Image (spheres, rainbow, N blue to C red):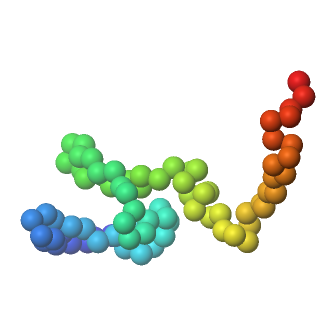
Amino acid sequence: MQSQIRKWGNSLGVRVPKKFADKLNLKDGSSINVEVTDKQLIISADTSELDRLVDKITKHNCHLEIFNDATLGKEIW
């Protein structure tokens, strides 16, 4: 897929097509890695698998834990 470089302030910017952004779980403000090798510009997502899993936690799928403060500090070894 081809895209165009556009001026963005004093820098240049590239638009990421929606289907690529969705595939890499990129959103507005996401961190990315940018590197140059030979004559290629490589842009990769800067999120780990753990970050993607944590992003899926909601109040509906989160386990609720209730702690009883009376038992704290009285562990038996």
Which residue in the rendered view is the most extreme toward the left? 10
* Residue nearer the viewer, 69 or 43: 69
Q: Residue 13 placed where, x, y %?
A: 21, 67
Q: At 47% across and 62% down in the image, what residue appears?
A: 24
Q: Quadrant of the C terminus?
A: top right
Residue 63 relative to residue 32: left or right: right
Res. 4 image quadrant: bottom left
Res. 74 image quadrant: top right
Residue 38 relative to residue 50: left or right: left
Q: At 51% across and 49% down in the image, what residue appears?
A: 48
Which residue in the rendered view is the most extreme toward the right? 76
Which residue in the rendered view is the most extreme toward the top? 77
Residue 77 relative to residue 2: left or right: right
Q: Is residue 8 above or below residue 75?
A: below
Residue 2 relative to residue 39: left or right: right
Q: At 48% across and 70% down in the image, what residue appears?
A: 22
Q: Residue 73 placed where, x, y %?
A: 80, 36
Q: Residue 43 placed where, x, y %?
A: 33, 55
Res. 17 image quadrant: bottom left
Q: At 24% across and 50% down in the image, what residue appears?
A: 40
* Residue nearer the viewer, 72 or 19: 72
* Residue nearer the viewer, 55 or 3: 55
Q: Residue 31 placed where, x, y %?
A: 37, 57
